[in-house]
Image: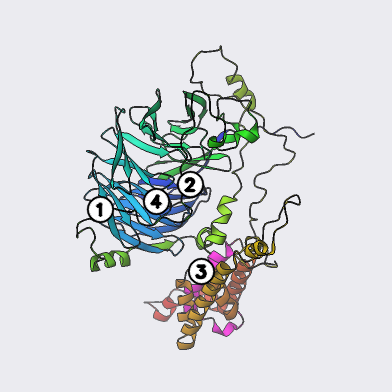
Amino acid sequence: MATPVVTKTAWKLQEIVAHASNVSSLVLGKASGRLLATGGDDCRVNLWSINKPNCIMSLTGHTSPVESVRLNTPEELIVAGSQSGSIRVWDLEAAKILRTLMGHKANICSLDFHPYGEFVASGSQDTNIKLWDIRRKGCVFRYRGHSQAVRCLRFSPDGKWLASAADDHTVKLWDLTAGKMMSEFPGHTGPVNVVEFHPNEYLLASGSSDRTIRFWDLEKFQVVSCIEGEPGPVRSVLFNPDGCCLYSGCQDSLRVYGWEPERCFDVVLVSWGKVADLAVCNDQLIGVAFSQSNVSSYVVDLTRVTRTGTVAQDPVQDSRPLAQQPPPPSAPLRRIYERPSTACGKPQRVKQNSESERRSPSSEDDRDERESRAEIQNAEEYNEIFQPKNSISRTPPRRSEPFPAPPEDDTATAKEAAKPSPPTDSQFPVPNLEVLPRPLVGTPTPAPKAEPAIIPATRNEPIGLKASDFLPAVKIPQQAELVDEDAMSQIRKGHDTMCVVLTSRHKNLDTVRAVWTTGDIKTSVDSAVAINDLSVVVDLLNIVNQKASLWKLDLCTTVLPQIEKLLQSKYESYVQTGCTSLKLILQRFLPLITDILAAPPSVGVDISREER
Protein backbone atom coordinates (compact mmCIF):
# COMPACT_ATOMS: atom_id res chain seq x y z
CA MET A 1 0.00 0.00 0.00
CA ALA A 2 1.36 3.43 -0.92
CA THR A 3 2.53 5.66 1.90
CA PRO A 4 0.65 8.96 2.25
CA VAL A 5 2.73 11.79 0.81
CA VAL A 6 2.96 14.73 3.22
CA THR A 7 3.31 17.98 1.27
CA LYS A 8 4.11 21.53 2.25
CA THR A 9 1.44 24.11 3.02
CA ALA A 10 3.61 26.95 1.67
CA TRP A 11 6.65 26.84 -0.58
CA LYS A 12 8.86 28.96 -2.81
CA LEU A 13 8.00 28.46 -6.46
CA GLN A 14 10.65 30.39 -8.35
CA GLU A 15 13.16 33.24 -8.30
CA ILE A 16 14.04 35.17 -11.46
CA VAL A 17 16.22 38.13 -12.42
CA ALA A 18 13.47 40.37 -13.77
CA HIS A 19 15.39 43.47 -14.88
CA ALA A 20 18.89 44.68 -15.62
CA SER A 21 18.50 47.12 -12.71
CA ASN A 22 16.34 47.28 -9.60
CA VAL A 23 12.68 46.24 -9.72
CA SER A 24 10.48 49.16 -8.65
CA SER A 25 6.94 47.73 -9.03
CA LEU A 26 5.05 44.56 -9.91
CA VAL A 27 1.52 43.20 -10.22
CA LEU A 28 -0.14 39.79 -10.61
CA GLY A 29 -3.00 39.11 -13.02
CA LYS A 30 -5.93 38.47 -10.70
CA ALA A 31 -8.04 36.51 -13.21
CA SER A 32 -5.52 33.78 -14.00
CA GLY A 33 -3.01 34.06 -11.16
CA ARG A 34 -0.41 33.09 -13.77
CA LEU A 35 0.61 36.39 -15.37
CA LEU A 36 3.18 38.69 -13.73
CA ALA A 37 4.17 42.20 -14.83
CA THR A 38 7.25 43.96 -13.43
CA GLY A 39 8.44 47.55 -13.76
CA GLY A 40 12.07 48.49 -13.28
CA ASP A 41 14.54 51.32 -12.93
CA ASP A 42 15.65 50.39 -16.46
CA CYS A 43 12.41 52.10 -17.67
CA ARG A 44 11.00 48.79 -18.97
CA VAL A 45 7.87 46.78 -18.20
CA ASN A 46 8.48 43.02 -18.47
CA LEU A 47 5.82 40.31 -18.59
CA TRP A 48 6.31 36.82 -17.19
CA SER A 49 4.38 33.60 -16.88
CA ILE A 50 4.50 32.38 -13.27
CA ASN A 51 6.89 29.42 -12.88
CA LYS A 52 8.43 30.03 -16.33
CA PRO A 53 12.03 31.29 -16.47
CA ASN A 54 11.91 33.45 -19.60
CA CYS A 55 10.44 36.91 -20.16
CA ILE A 56 7.42 36.81 -22.51
CA MET A 57 7.44 40.44 -23.58
CA SER A 58 9.36 43.62 -22.79
CA LEU A 59 7.58 46.98 -23.16
CA THR A 60 9.68 50.09 -23.78
CA GLY A 61 8.91 53.77 -24.14
CA HIS A 62 9.21 55.22 -20.65
CA THR A 63 12.24 57.44 -20.09
CA SER A 64 12.23 57.24 -16.28
CA PRO A 65 11.82 54.36 -13.78
CA VAL A 66 8.43 52.61 -13.82
CA GLU A 67 6.79 53.25 -10.44
CA SER A 68 3.40 51.53 -10.86
CA VAL A 69 1.88 48.82 -13.10
CA ARG A 70 -1.61 47.35 -13.36
CA LEU A 71 -3.34 44.73 -15.57
CA ASN A 72 -6.99 44.96 -16.54
CA THR A 73 -9.39 42.18 -15.54
CA PRO A 74 -9.22 40.13 -18.80
CA GLU A 75 -5.40 40.58 -18.76
CA GLU A 76 -5.43 42.07 -22.26
CA LEU A 77 -4.23 45.59 -21.39
CA ILE A 78 -1.49 46.85 -19.09
CA VAL A 79 -0.93 50.39 -17.82
CA ALA A 80 2.37 51.65 -16.40
CA GLY A 81 3.16 54.95 -14.71
CA SER A 82 6.64 56.43 -14.46
CA GLN A 83 8.62 58.64 -12.13
CA SER A 84 8.19 61.56 -14.53
CA GLY A 85 4.37 61.38 -14.35
CA SER A 86 3.74 59.87 -17.78
CA ILE A 87 1.35 56.93 -18.24
CA ARG A 88 1.45 54.39 -21.04
CA VAL A 89 -1.16 51.77 -21.94
CA TRP A 90 -0.22 48.73 -24.03
CA ASP A 91 -2.43 46.21 -25.82
CA LEU A 92 -0.84 42.85 -24.96
CA GLU A 93 -2.67 40.84 -27.58
CA ALA A 94 -1.73 43.23 -30.39
CA ALA A 95 1.75 43.70 -28.85
CA LYS A 96 1.72 47.49 -29.33
CA ILE A 97 1.41 50.77 -27.46
CA LEU A 98 -2.21 51.91 -27.19
CA ARG A 99 -2.05 55.28 -25.44
CA THR A 100 0.36 57.76 -23.87
CA LEU A 101 -1.30 59.88 -21.18
CA MET A 102 0.37 63.05 -19.90
CA GLY A 103 -0.85 65.37 -17.15
CA HIS A 104 0.58 64.47 -13.74
CA LYS A 105 3.42 66.65 -12.45
CA ALA A 106 5.10 64.00 -10.25
CA ASN A 107 5.68 60.26 -10.18
CA ILE A 108 2.72 57.88 -10.53
CA CYS A 109 2.13 55.95 -7.28
CA SER A 110 -1.05 54.00 -8.11
CA LEU A 111 -3.17 52.84 -11.06
CA ASP A 112 -6.34 50.83 -11.65
CA PHE A 113 -8.51 49.79 -14.59
CA HIS A 114 -12.27 50.30 -14.52
CA PRO A 115 -13.93 46.84 -14.35
CA TYR A 116 -16.26 47.49 -17.33
CA GLY A 117 -15.55 50.71 -19.22
CA GLU A 118 -12.32 51.68 -20.95
CA PHE A 119 -11.12 53.97 -18.17
CA VAL A 120 -7.95 54.15 -16.08
CA ALA A 121 -7.54 55.91 -12.74
CA SER A 122 -4.14 57.26 -11.70
CA GLY A 123 -2.88 58.59 -8.38
CA SER A 124 0.28 60.63 -8.08
CA GLN A 125 2.68 62.18 -5.64
CA ASP A 126 1.24 65.50 -6.80
CA THR A 127 -1.82 64.50 -4.62
CA ASN A 128 -4.18 64.45 -7.64
CA ILE A 129 -6.33 61.57 -8.86
CA LYS A 130 -7.18 61.52 -12.56
CA LEU A 131 -9.70 59.47 -14.51
CA TRP A 132 -8.64 58.82 -18.11
CA ASP A 133 -10.68 57.72 -21.12
CA ILE A 134 -8.17 55.55 -22.99
CA ARG A 135 -10.39 55.48 -26.10
CA ARG A 136 -10.04 59.19 -26.78
CA LYS A 137 -6.80 59.75 -24.89
CA GLY A 138 -8.20 62.35 -22.55
CA CYS A 139 -8.58 63.14 -18.87
CA VAL A 140 -12.27 62.78 -17.94
CA PHE A 141 -12.02 64.26 -14.45
CA ARG A 142 -9.59 65.29 -11.73
CA TYR A 143 -10.34 64.47 -8.10
CA ARG A 144 -8.72 66.71 -5.49
CA GLY A 145 -8.81 66.23 -1.75
CA HIS A 146 -5.71 64.39 -0.57
CA SER A 147 -2.86 66.44 0.83
CA GLN A 148 -0.09 63.86 0.24
CA ALA A 149 0.83 61.13 -2.26
CA VAL A 150 -2.01 58.80 -3.35
CA ARG A 151 -0.67 55.27 -2.74
CA CYS A 152 -3.54 53.02 -3.86
CA LEU A 153 -6.65 53.23 -6.07
CA ARG A 154 -9.43 50.66 -6.48
CA PHE A 155 -12.68 50.76 -8.45
CA SER A 156 -15.71 49.15 -6.79
CA PRO A 157 -16.93 45.85 -8.31
CA ASP A 158 -19.91 47.63 -9.90
CA GLY A 159 -17.68 50.36 -11.35
CA LYS A 160 -19.59 53.26 -9.73
CA TRP A 161 -17.09 54.24 -7.01
CA LEU A 162 -13.37 54.79 -6.66
CA ALA A 163 -11.54 54.32 -3.34
CA SER A 164 -8.23 56.06 -2.70
CA ALA A 165 -5.60 55.65 0.03
CA ALA A 166 -2.90 58.22 0.70
CA ASP A 167 0.05 59.17 2.87
CA ASP A 168 -2.17 61.74 4.63
CA HIS A 169 -3.59 58.85 6.78
CA THR A 170 -7.01 58.96 5.08
CA VAL A 171 -9.17 56.79 2.83
CA LYS A 172 -11.60 58.57 0.50
CA LEU A 173 -14.54 57.25 -1.53
CA TRP A 174 -15.39 59.04 -4.80
CA ASP A 175 -18.64 58.90 -6.78
CA LEU A 176 -17.71 58.68 -10.47
CA THR A 177 -21.14 59.74 -11.71
CA ALA A 178 -21.41 62.84 -9.53
CA GLY A 179 -17.70 63.63 -9.80
CA LYS A 180 -17.29 64.33 -6.09
CA MET A 181 -16.18 62.74 -2.82
CA MET A 182 -18.84 60.61 -1.13
CA SER A 183 -17.10 60.05 2.18
CA GLU A 184 -13.79 60.26 4.00
CA PHE A 185 -12.67 57.55 6.41
CA PRO A 186 -10.30 58.86 9.09
CA GLY A 187 -8.85 56.65 11.82
CA HIS A 188 -5.49 55.44 10.61
CA THR A 189 -2.50 57.03 12.34
CA GLY A 190 -0.02 56.35 9.54
CA PRO A 191 0.15 56.38 5.74
CA VAL A 192 -2.52 54.15 4.17
CA ASN A 193 -0.83 51.81 1.68
CA VAL A 194 -3.66 49.66 0.31
CA VAL A 195 -7.46 49.52 -0.07
CA GLU A 196 -9.55 46.60 -1.31
CA PHE A 197 -13.29 46.25 -1.98
CA HIS A 198 -15.17 43.15 -0.81
CA PRO A 199 -16.12 41.16 -3.95
CA ASN A 200 -19.84 41.09 -3.06
CA GLU A 201 -20.81 43.29 -0.11
CA TYR A 202 -20.63 47.02 0.52
CA LEU A 203 -17.43 46.63 2.56
CA LEU A 204 -13.97 48.18 2.15
CA ALA A 205 -10.68 47.10 3.79
CA SER A 206 -7.70 49.41 4.24
CA GLY A 207 -4.17 48.61 5.41
CA SER A 208 -1.77 51.14 6.86
CA SER A 209 1.79 51.65 8.04
CA ASP A 210 0.30 52.02 11.55
CA ARG A 211 0.11 48.15 11.51
CA THR A 212 -3.68 48.02 11.44
CA ILE A 213 -6.34 46.83 8.99
CA ARG A 214 -9.67 48.63 9.14
CA PHE A 215 -12.99 47.49 7.67
CA TRP A 216 -15.49 50.15 6.55
CA ASP A 217 -19.25 49.82 6.01
CA LEU A 218 -20.09 51.54 2.70
CA GLU A 219 -23.78 51.97 3.52
CA LYS A 220 -23.39 53.60 6.93
CA PHE A 221 -19.92 55.04 6.14
CA GLN A 222 -18.49 53.98 9.48
CA VAL A 223 -15.83 51.60 10.74
CA VAL A 224 -16.92 47.98 11.22
CA SER A 225 -13.84 46.66 13.01
CA CYS A 226 -10.10 47.13 13.31
CA ILE A 227 -7.38 44.45 13.26
CA GLU A 228 -4.42 45.54 15.37
CA GLY A 229 -1.08 43.94 16.13
CA GLU A 230 0.20 43.32 12.59
CA PRO A 231 3.94 42.52 12.68
CA GLY A 232 4.77 45.40 10.32
CA PRO A 233 3.29 47.94 7.89
CA VAL A 234 0.34 46.51 5.93
CA ARG A 235 1.14 46.66 2.20
CA SER A 236 -0.80 43.81 0.58
CA VAL A 237 -4.32 42.54 1.33
CA LEU A 238 -6.77 40.47 -0.72
CA PHE A 239 -10.30 39.18 -0.13
CA ASN A 240 -10.97 35.52 -0.86
CA PRO A 241 -12.96 35.30 -4.14
CA ASP A 242 -16.11 34.22 -2.26
CA GLY A 243 -15.63 36.98 0.33
CA CYS A 244 -15.37 34.67 3.35
CA CYS A 245 -12.10 36.14 4.66
CA LEU A 246 -9.27 38.62 4.07
CA TYR A 247 -5.66 37.62 3.44
CA SER A 248 -2.88 39.88 4.66
CA GLY A 249 0.64 39.42 3.35
CA CYS A 250 2.82 40.16 6.36
CA GLN A 251 6.56 39.94 6.90
CA ASP A 252 7.34 36.23 6.34
CA SER A 253 3.75 35.13 7.03
CA LEU A 254 0.22 35.02 5.66
CA ARG A 255 -2.59 35.95 8.05
CA VAL A 256 -6.26 35.13 7.49
CA TYR A 257 -8.79 37.50 9.08
CA GLY A 258 -12.51 37.86 9.72
CA TRP A 259 -14.10 41.21 10.56
CA GLU A 260 -17.39 40.62 12.43
CA PRO A 261 -16.08 40.23 15.03
CA GLU A 262 -12.45 40.94 14.21
CA ARG A 263 -10.43 37.73 14.56
CA CYS A 264 -7.51 35.87 13.04
CA PHE A 265 -8.49 32.47 11.59
CA ASP A 266 -5.00 31.24 10.75
CA VAL A 267 -1.33 32.19 10.37
CA VAL A 268 0.91 30.46 7.81
CA LEU A 269 4.66 30.98 7.84
CA VAL A 270 5.97 31.90 4.37
CA SER A 271 9.56 33.03 3.83
CA TRP A 272 8.64 35.70 1.27
CA GLY A 273 9.96 38.70 3.20
CA LYS A 274 7.96 41.77 2.17
CA VAL A 275 5.32 40.41 -0.20
CA ALA A 276 4.24 42.94 -2.85
CA ASP A 277 1.10 41.40 -4.40
CA LEU A 278 -1.30 38.48 -3.94
CA ALA A 279 -3.66 36.50 -6.18
CA VAL A 280 -5.90 33.45 -5.64
CA CYS A 281 -6.32 30.69 -8.22
CA ASN A 282 -7.26 26.99 -7.95
CA ASP A 283 -7.45 27.10 -4.14
CA GLN A 284 -3.88 28.38 -4.06
CA LEU A 285 -2.66 31.81 -3.02
CA ILE A 286 0.19 33.17 -5.16
CA GLY A 287 2.45 35.78 -3.57
CA VAL A 288 5.26 37.71 -5.24
CA ALA A 289 8.05 39.73 -3.66
CA PHE A 290 11.00 41.64 -5.08
CA SER A 291 14.45 42.62 -3.86
CA GLN A 292 16.86 44.61 -6.05
CA SER A 293 16.63 43.01 -9.53
CA ASN A 294 15.16 39.68 -8.33
CA VAL A 295 11.51 38.64 -8.13
CA SER A 296 10.42 35.59 -6.10
CA SER A 297 7.07 33.80 -6.25
CA TYR A 298 5.50 31.70 -3.50
CA VAL A 299 2.46 29.41 -3.20
CA VAL A 300 0.18 28.72 -0.21
CA ASP A 301 -2.19 25.73 -0.34
CA LEU A 302 -5.49 27.26 0.80
CA THR A 303 -7.15 23.85 1.26
CA ARG A 304 -5.00 23.51 4.38
CA VAL A 305 -5.68 27.01 5.69
CA THR A 306 -8.55 27.84 8.05
CA ARG A 307 -10.69 30.46 6.34
CA THR A 308 -13.84 30.57 8.48
CA GLY A 309 -14.65 30.65 12.17
CA THR A 310 -16.21 27.18 12.14
CA VAL A 311 -13.62 24.55 11.31
CA ALA A 312 -15.98 21.58 10.96
CA GLN A 313 -18.20 23.22 8.37
CA ASP A 314 -19.97 21.51 5.52
CA PRO A 315 -17.58 21.90 2.57
CA VAL A 316 -20.43 22.41 0.11
CA GLN A 317 -21.88 25.27 2.13
CA ASP A 318 -18.43 26.66 2.87
CA SER A 319 -17.68 27.01 -0.84
CA ARG A 320 -20.62 29.33 -1.44
CA PRO A 321 -20.20 33.09 -1.58
CA LEU A 322 -20.61 34.75 1.78
CA ALA A 323 -23.68 36.55 0.52
CA GLN A 324 -25.52 33.22 0.21
CA GLN A 325 -24.65 31.96 3.70
CA PRO A 326 -26.93 32.75 6.64
CA PRO A 327 -25.33 35.70 8.43
CA PRO A 328 -24.39 35.56 12.11
CA PRO A 329 -27.10 36.99 14.37
CA SER A 330 -24.89 39.96 15.30
CA ALA A 331 -23.91 40.71 11.69
CA PRO A 332 -26.79 41.62 9.38
CA LEU A 333 -26.08 41.01 5.71
CA ARG A 334 -24.95 44.06 3.77
CA ARG A 335 -26.13 45.25 0.43
CA ILE A 336 -24.74 43.46 -2.62
CA TYR A 337 -23.15 45.20 -5.61
CA GLU A 338 -25.32 45.34 -8.71
CA ARG A 339 -22.98 44.67 -11.61
CA PRO A 340 -24.09 45.99 -15.02
CA SER A 341 -24.98 43.39 -17.61
CA THR A 342 -23.21 45.37 -20.35
CA ALA A 343 -20.07 47.43 -20.48
CA CYS A 344 -20.67 50.79 -18.91
CA GLY A 345 -20.40 53.94 -20.88
CA LYS A 346 -18.82 57.16 -19.84
CA PRO A 347 -19.88 58.26 -16.33
CA GLN A 348 -22.92 60.50 -16.62
CA ARG A 349 -22.93 64.15 -15.62
CA VAL A 350 -19.15 64.28 -15.34
CA LYS A 351 -17.90 67.83 -15.24
CA GLN A 352 -15.86 68.96 -18.23
CA ASN A 353 -12.19 69.69 -17.73
CA SER A 354 -10.21 72.59 -19.00
CA GLU A 355 -9.25 72.70 -22.65
CA SER A 356 -5.66 71.78 -21.82
CA GLU A 357 -6.77 68.47 -20.35
CA ARG A 358 -9.17 67.71 -23.21
CA ARG A 359 -6.62 68.45 -25.90
CA SER A 360 -6.42 66.20 -28.91
CA PRO A 361 -3.37 64.00 -29.44
CA SER A 362 -0.37 66.10 -30.41
CA SER A 363 2.53 65.32 -32.69
CA GLU A 364 4.73 64.95 -29.59
CA ASP A 365 2.39 62.28 -28.23
CA ASP A 366 2.45 60.50 -31.59
CA ARG A 367 6.24 60.53 -31.51
CA ASP A 368 6.21 59.02 -28.02
CA GLU A 369 3.94 56.24 -29.23
CA ARG A 370 6.21 55.56 -32.19
CA GLU A 371 9.17 55.28 -29.82
CA SER A 372 7.33 52.87 -27.51
CA ARG A 373 7.75 49.23 -28.47
CA ALA A 374 6.50 45.83 -27.32
CA GLU A 375 9.40 43.44 -27.82
CA ILE A 376 8.29 39.80 -27.78
CA GLN A 377 11.09 37.88 -26.05
CA ASN A 378 9.52 34.42 -26.09
CA ALA A 379 7.23 33.89 -29.08
CA GLU A 380 5.94 30.46 -28.05
CA GLU A 381 4.81 31.54 -24.57
CA TYR A 382 3.44 34.82 -25.98
CA ASN A 383 1.33 32.92 -28.52
CA GLU A 384 0.17 30.50 -25.84
CA ILE A 385 -1.03 33.28 -23.52
CA PHE A 386 -2.05 36.21 -25.76
CA GLN A 387 -2.58 34.77 -29.26
CA PRO A 388 -5.08 33.96 -30.57
CA LYS A 389 -7.53 36.18 -28.74
CA ASN A 390 -10.10 35.65 -26.01
CA SER A 391 -11.84 32.46 -27.05
CA ILE A 392 -8.61 30.51 -26.79
CA SER A 393 -5.98 32.40 -24.88
CA ARG A 394 -8.09 33.54 -21.96
CA THR A 395 -9.50 30.05 -21.39
CA PRO A 396 -6.39 27.98 -20.56
CA PRO A 397 -5.20 30.20 -17.66
CA ARG A 398 -8.61 29.87 -15.97
CA ARG A 399 -8.46 26.07 -16.35
CA SER A 400 -4.81 25.89 -15.39
CA GLU A 401 -3.74 23.18 -12.99
CA PRO A 402 -2.67 24.02 -9.43
CA PHE A 403 1.06 24.15 -8.82
CA PRO A 404 2.17 20.75 -7.43
CA ALA A 405 3.10 20.91 -3.75
CA PRO A 406 6.60 19.61 -2.90
CA PRO A 407 6.96 16.98 -0.16
CA GLU A 408 7.69 18.15 3.37
CA ASP A 409 11.43 18.35 4.09
CA ASP A 410 11.37 16.64 7.47
CA THR A 411 7.97 15.48 8.67
CA ALA A 412 9.21 14.27 12.06
CA THR A 413 10.92 17.56 12.86
CA ALA A 414 7.89 19.60 11.78
CA LYS A 415 5.54 17.53 13.92
CA GLU A 416 7.88 17.77 16.90
CA ALA A 417 7.93 21.56 16.54
CA ALA A 418 4.14 21.64 16.38
CA LYS A 419 3.38 19.82 19.66
CA PRO A 420 0.20 21.19 21.28
CA SER A 421 0.87 24.16 23.52
CA PRO A 422 -1.21 25.09 26.59
CA PRO A 423 -4.57 26.65 25.65
CA THR A 424 -4.68 30.42 25.45
CA ASP A 425 -7.55 32.91 25.56
CA SER A 426 -6.07 35.06 22.80
CA GLN A 427 -8.27 35.52 19.74
CA PHE A 428 -5.18 35.58 17.49
CA PRO A 429 -3.72 32.08 17.04
CA VAL A 430 -0.02 31.36 16.96
CA PRO A 431 1.37 30.14 13.63
CA ASN A 432 0.20 26.60 12.94
CA LEU A 433 3.19 24.49 11.92
CA GLU A 434 1.47 21.11 12.13
CA VAL A 435 1.91 19.08 8.96
CA LEU A 436 -1.41 17.69 7.80
CA PRO A 437 -1.29 14.58 5.61
CA ARG A 438 -2.81 14.99 2.18
CA PRO A 439 -5.09 12.39 0.62
CA LEU A 440 -3.41 9.09 -0.16
CA VAL A 441 -1.22 9.33 -3.24
CA GLY A 442 -0.28 6.16 -5.07
CA THR A 443 1.85 7.77 -7.75
CA PRO A 444 3.37 11.23 -7.99
CA THR A 445 0.93 13.78 -9.44
CA PRO A 446 3.04 16.80 -10.38
CA ALA A 447 0.67 18.11 -13.05
CA PRO A 448 -1.71 15.64 -14.66
CA LYS A 449 -2.67 17.91 -17.55
CA ALA A 450 0.69 19.57 -18.05
CA GLU A 451 1.80 19.93 -21.64
CA PRO A 452 4.44 17.35 -22.63
CA ALA A 453 8.05 18.46 -23.01
CA ILE A 454 8.06 17.34 -26.66
CA ILE A 455 5.00 17.56 -28.89
CA PRO A 456 5.19 14.85 -31.61
CA ALA A 457 5.22 15.91 -35.24
CA THR A 458 2.62 13.29 -36.19
CA ARG A 459 -0.49 14.56 -34.49
CA ASN A 460 -4.05 15.33 -35.37
CA GLU A 461 -4.23 19.05 -34.64
CA PRO A 462 -2.44 22.23 -35.81
CA ILE A 463 0.84 23.24 -34.19
CA GLY A 464 0.33 25.79 -31.43
CA LEU A 465 -3.46 25.27 -31.33
CA LYS A 466 -5.56 22.95 -29.19
CA ALA A 467 -8.52 21.35 -30.90
CA SER A 468 -10.29 21.02 -27.55
CA ASP A 469 -10.57 24.81 -27.37
CA PHE A 470 -12.87 24.76 -30.42
CA LEU A 471 -15.07 21.83 -29.37
CA PRO A 472 -18.08 21.90 -27.04
CA ALA A 473 -17.37 20.84 -23.48
CA VAL A 474 -18.19 17.24 -22.61
CA LYS A 475 -21.45 17.24 -20.72
CA ILE A 476 -22.24 15.08 -17.70
CA PRO A 477 -24.87 12.44 -18.64
CA GLN A 478 -27.23 13.57 -15.88
CA GLN A 479 -27.49 17.08 -17.30
CA ALA A 480 -30.28 18.06 -19.67
CA GLU A 481 -29.55 17.68 -23.36
CA LEU A 482 -28.66 20.88 -25.21
CA VAL A 483 -31.07 22.35 -27.69
CA ASP A 484 -29.82 22.70 -31.27
CA GLU A 485 -29.19 26.45 -31.00
CA ASP A 486 -27.05 26.09 -27.86
CA ALA A 487 -25.11 23.20 -29.39
CA MET A 488 -24.38 25.17 -32.55
CA SER A 489 -23.37 28.20 -30.48
CA GLN A 490 -20.82 26.14 -28.55
CA ILE A 491 -19.47 24.45 -31.67
CA ARG A 492 -18.94 27.83 -33.40
CA LYS A 493 -17.59 29.51 -30.28
CA GLY A 494 -13.95 29.62 -31.40
CA HIS A 495 -14.49 29.56 -35.15
CA ASP A 496 -13.97 33.29 -35.76
CA THR A 497 -10.88 33.38 -33.57
CA MET A 498 -9.31 30.41 -35.33
CA CYS A 499 -9.97 32.10 -38.67
CA VAL A 500 -8.16 35.20 -37.40
CA VAL A 501 -5.16 33.08 -36.38
CA LEU A 502 -4.93 31.25 -39.69
CA THR A 503 -5.55 34.44 -41.68
CA SER A 504 -2.72 36.18 -39.81
CA ARG A 505 -0.34 33.31 -40.54
CA HIS A 506 -1.36 33.29 -44.21
CA LYS A 507 -0.82 37.06 -44.40
CA ASN A 508 2.70 36.72 -42.97
CA LEU A 509 3.56 34.03 -45.52
CA ASP A 510 2.19 36.21 -48.34
CA THR A 511 4.46 39.02 -47.16
CA VAL A 512 7.51 36.73 -47.27
CA ARG A 513 6.50 35.41 -50.70
CA ALA A 514 6.12 38.95 -52.08
CA VAL A 515 9.63 39.82 -50.86
CA TRP A 516 11.00 36.63 -52.44
CA THR A 517 9.49 37.40 -55.86
CA THR A 518 10.98 40.93 -55.90
CA GLY A 519 14.31 40.16 -54.24
CA ASP A 520 16.60 37.29 -53.31
CA ILE A 521 16.27 34.46 -50.83
CA LYS A 522 18.38 36.30 -48.22
CA THR A 523 15.97 39.27 -48.17
CA SER A 524 12.93 37.00 -47.81
CA VAL A 525 14.54 35.10 -44.92
CA ASP A 526 15.35 38.42 -43.24
CA SER A 527 11.70 39.46 -43.56
CA ALA A 528 10.52 36.13 -42.09
CA VAL A 529 12.84 36.54 -39.11
CA ALA A 530 11.65 40.13 -38.59
CA ILE A 531 8.04 38.90 -38.22
CA ASN A 532 9.21 37.20 -34.99
CA ASP A 533 7.09 34.08 -35.50
CA LEU A 534 8.91 30.75 -35.53
CA SER A 535 6.08 29.06 -37.45
CA VAL A 536 6.74 31.37 -40.45
CA VAL A 537 10.49 30.61 -40.27
CA VAL A 538 9.72 26.88 -40.21
CA ASP A 539 7.44 27.16 -43.25
CA LEU A 540 10.13 29.04 -45.19
CA LEU A 541 12.96 26.66 -44.20
CA ASN A 542 10.87 23.67 -45.28
CA ILE A 543 10.82 25.22 -48.77
CA VAL A 544 14.51 26.15 -48.81
CA ASN A 545 15.44 22.66 -47.62
CA GLN A 546 13.88 21.21 -50.78
CA LYS A 547 16.61 22.82 -52.90
CA ALA A 548 20.13 22.63 -51.45
CA SER A 549 21.53 25.01 -54.07
CA LEU A 550 19.63 27.90 -52.42
CA TRP A 551 21.95 27.80 -49.42
CA LYS A 552 24.61 30.54 -49.43
CA LEU A 553 27.10 31.54 -46.77
CA ASP A 554 25.45 34.92 -46.13
CA LEU A 555 22.14 33.11 -45.60
CA CYS A 556 23.71 31.05 -42.80
CA THR A 557 24.42 34.15 -40.70
CA THR A 558 20.68 34.87 -40.55
CA VAL A 559 19.40 31.31 -40.28
CA LEU A 560 21.78 29.79 -37.71
CA PRO A 561 20.35 31.78 -34.70
CA GLN A 562 16.85 30.69 -35.78
CA ILE A 563 17.98 27.06 -36.08
CA GLU A 564 19.22 27.28 -32.48
CA LYS A 565 15.70 28.32 -31.38
CA LEU A 566 14.15 25.49 -33.41
CA LEU A 567 16.41 22.88 -31.82
CA GLN A 568 15.27 24.06 -28.36
CA SER A 569 11.56 24.03 -29.29
CA LYS A 570 9.07 21.66 -27.68
CA TYR A 571 7.59 20.86 -31.11
CA GLU A 572 9.19 17.84 -32.74
CA SER A 573 8.45 19.16 -36.24
CA TYR A 574 10.36 22.36 -35.45
CA VAL A 575 13.33 20.30 -34.24
CA GLN A 576 13.19 18.15 -37.40
CA THR A 577 13.20 21.21 -39.66
CA GLY A 578 16.13 22.72 -37.73
CA CYS A 579 18.12 19.46 -37.98
CA THR A 580 17.46 19.19 -41.72
CA SER A 581 18.64 22.78 -42.32
CA LEU A 582 21.77 22.23 -40.21
CA LYS A 583 22.54 19.01 -42.08
CA LEU A 584 22.30 20.77 -45.47
CA ILE A 585 24.55 23.60 -44.27
CA LEU A 586 27.21 21.13 -43.16
CA GLN A 587 26.95 19.06 -46.33
CA ARG A 588 27.34 22.13 -48.53
CA PHE A 589 29.95 24.10 -46.62
CA LEU A 590 31.89 21.54 -44.52
CA PRO A 591 34.78 21.24 -47.04
CA LEU A 592 35.12 25.04 -47.13
CA ILE A 593 34.99 25.29 -43.34
CA THR A 594 37.59 22.51 -42.97
CA ASP A 595 39.95 24.10 -45.52
CA ILE A 596 39.76 27.49 -43.86
CA LEU A 597 40.42 26.06 -40.41
CA ALA A 598 43.26 23.85 -41.63
CA ALA A 599 44.98 26.51 -43.76
CA PRO A 600 48.23 27.98 -42.35
CA PRO A 601 48.08 31.61 -41.24
CA SER A 602 48.66 33.93 -44.16
CA VAL A 603 50.82 37.01 -44.28
CA GLY A 604 48.70 40.12 -44.07
CA VAL A 605 44.91 40.02 -44.24
CA ASP A 606 43.04 37.83 -46.73
CA ILE A 607 39.81 39.81 -47.18
CA SER A 608 37.82 37.02 -48.86
CA ARG A 609 38.95 34.49 -46.24
CA GLU A 610 37.96 36.79 -43.39
CA GLU A 611 34.54 37.32 -44.92
CA ARG A 612 34.01 33.58 -45.21
Mark 1 or mark 2: which is in front? Answer: 1
Please tell me which residue lies in front, 551 or 272: 272
Image x and y of residue 101, in percent:
29, 58
Specify the label residue 30 is tagged with. Answer: 2
Return the residue at label 1: 351
Image x and y of residue 67, in percent:
32, 47
Mark 4 surroundings: few (<14), some (14-19) or many (≥20) residues within 10 A: many
Mark 1 or mark 3: which is in front? Answer: 1
Mark 1 surroundings: few (<14), some (14-19) or many (≥20) residues within 10 A: some
**Residue 63 is at least partly visible in this image:** no
Return the residue at label 3: 533
Mark 4 belongs to which amino acid?
A: His
Mark 4 or mark 3: which is in front? Answer: 4
Q: Earlier in the sequence, mark 3 or mark 2?
A: 2
Q: Is residue 564 magenta-colored?
A: yes
Up the image or down, 600 lies above or below 417; here it is below
Specify the label residue 364 is tagged with. Answer: none
Q: Do the residues labelled 1 and 2 touch (CB within 8 Å)?
A: no
Give the SS element for disc 4.
loop
Mark 1 belongs to which amino acid?
A: Lys
